[in-house]
Image (cartoon, grey):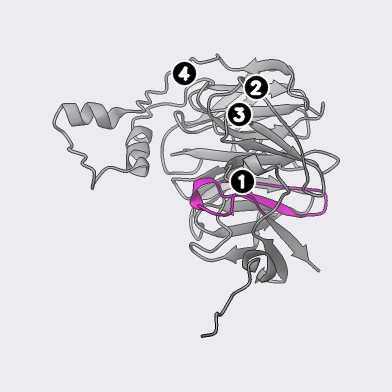
């Protein structure tokens, strides 16, 4: 009898290329050289610094922030004891890290060695948006619903909580994303327990809050991520409303897209394009005229992502989180 064997490194050997409208990327499904203890670690977001080091927010509470060098080699991890529920992060003009903690309702600023600098928000205290995280439990006790083992799931209970949000509240109630704009102002999407975007000065003073619950331009269900492009325009991905809003830095709506997306979850921009990662399996690319130039992937294709960032080479890093049970960090490499 002949034993037929496949390729042990099948995931790494086969080429997967995603192309549309003249833009092509090769998918590297398993990126990074990690120590053994990180084999099953999940990453919810990331960012690259000027040297193309990659910083990841890790759902392992022992290693909440992980650093890889520009070649993908593990350098270090830090932040143990500083976080409850990490989500995303960005590098500032001062070469520090702004880290979103959804569970503690703050943005924590750290040095790249893990030293605490300051918090934006009230540590452990959510603002009053009307949000009731466990409203489904109260509904059950009142006899309004009867979630059983068959009916109940995490997504359903999350959506029930989102529907209780009544107003755009001050910072923060379960924030989701953070970005520093070209002027040094800090912008935060406050999306899991609020329906707002906040703008802060570089020194941390709150300058503006806008949004509110709804499914129209300028209103949100779950503002999950944001990025400020080189023209100071604020791009916000509303995951559950399947929409992307573009604002000026004062919250005035400039553009809106609510069709042909697969749940926008991560946004990053370089000097040429704005890249929108979609949890449902796509990547939408817009130019600086706010026009869509390409949409890669298909519904439930392999390029699913919860978080996304890029480096100086135009390479994109995808953090699938729980959308995958196998690939936890992927890379899209542009092809000439």
Please give the range of residues in magenta.
Answer: 306-330
User: How packed is label 1: few (under 14 Cα within 10 Å), some, or many (20 or more)?
Assistant: few
Which mark is first along the chain, 1 or 4? 1
Q: Which residue is mark 2?
A: 108
* Location of residue 214 in the rendering, given as x and y in whole percent from the top left corner: 41, 39
Q: Which residue is mark 4?
A: 127
Disc 4 or disc 1, which is closer to the eye? 1
For the C terminus, give its image quadrant.
bottom right
Q: Is residue 160 visible?
A: yes
Q: Secondary structure at mark 3?
A: loop
Q: Secondary structure at mark 1?
A: loop
Marks 4,3: beta carbons within 8 A: no
Disc 2 or disc 1, which is closer to the eye? 1
Marks 4,2: beta carbons within 8 A: no
**Residue at 61% from the left image edge and 58% from the top image edge:** 284
Q: Which residue is mark 1?
A: 39
Using the rendered view, name the quadrant where residue 183 is placed: top right
Which mark is first along the chain, 1 or 3? 1
User: How packed is label 4: few (under 14 Cα within 10 Å), some, or many (20 or more)?
Assistant: some
Which mark is first along the chain, 1 or 2? 1
Check if residue 309 falls in the magenta segment.
yes
Q: Secondary structure at mark 4?
A: loop
Marks 2,3: beta carbons within 8 A: no
**Residue at 69% from the left image edge and 69% from the top image edge:** 13
Give how far apart the Cα atoms at labels 4 and 3 are. Answer: 28 Å
Give how far apart the Cα atoms at labels 3 and 1 are. Answer: 14 Å
Q: Which residue is mark 3?
A: 62
């Amino acid at each position: 009898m002949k034993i037929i064997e496949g390729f042990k490194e099948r995931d790494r050997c086969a080429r997967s290329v995603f192309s549309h409208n003249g833009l092509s990327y090769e998918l590297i499904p398993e990126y990074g050289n990690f120590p053994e203890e990180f084999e099953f670690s999940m990453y919810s977001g990331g960012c690259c610094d000027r040297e193309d080091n990659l910083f990841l927010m890790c759902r392992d509470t022992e290693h909440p922030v992980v650093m890889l060098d520009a070649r993908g080699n593990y350098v270090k991890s830090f932040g143990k004891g500083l976080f409850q529920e990490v989500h995303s992060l960005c590098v500032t003009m001062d070469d520090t890290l702004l880290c979103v903690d959804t569970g503690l309702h703050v943005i924590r600023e750290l040095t790249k060695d893990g030293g605490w600098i300051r918090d934006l928000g009230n540590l452990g205290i959510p603002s009053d948006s009307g949000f009731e995280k466990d409203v489904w439990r109260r509904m059950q006790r009142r006899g309004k619903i009867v979630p059983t083992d068959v009916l109940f799931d995490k997504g359903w209970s999350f959506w029930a909580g989102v529907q209780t949000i009544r107003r755009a509240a001050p910072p923060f109630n379960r924030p989701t994303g953070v970005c520093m704009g070209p002027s040094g102002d800090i912008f935060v999407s406050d999306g899991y327990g609020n329906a707002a975007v906040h703008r802060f000065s570089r020194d941390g003073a709150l300058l503006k809050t806008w949004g509110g619950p709804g499914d129209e331009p300028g209103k949100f269900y779950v503002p999950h991520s944001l990025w400020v492009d080189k023209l100071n325009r604020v791009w916000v991905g509303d995951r559950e409303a399947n929409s992307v809003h573009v604002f000026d830095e004062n919250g005035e709506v400039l553009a809106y897209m609510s069709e042909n997306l697969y749940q926008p979850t991560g946004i990053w921009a370089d000097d040429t394009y704005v890249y929108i990662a979609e949890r449902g399996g796509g990547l939408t690319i817009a130019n600086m005229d706010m026009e869509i130039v390409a949409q890669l992937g298909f519904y439930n294709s392999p390029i699913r992502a919860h978080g996304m960032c890029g480096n100086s080479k135009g390479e994109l890093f995808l953090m699938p989180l729980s959308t995958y049970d196998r690939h936890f960090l992927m890379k899209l490499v542009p092809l000439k």
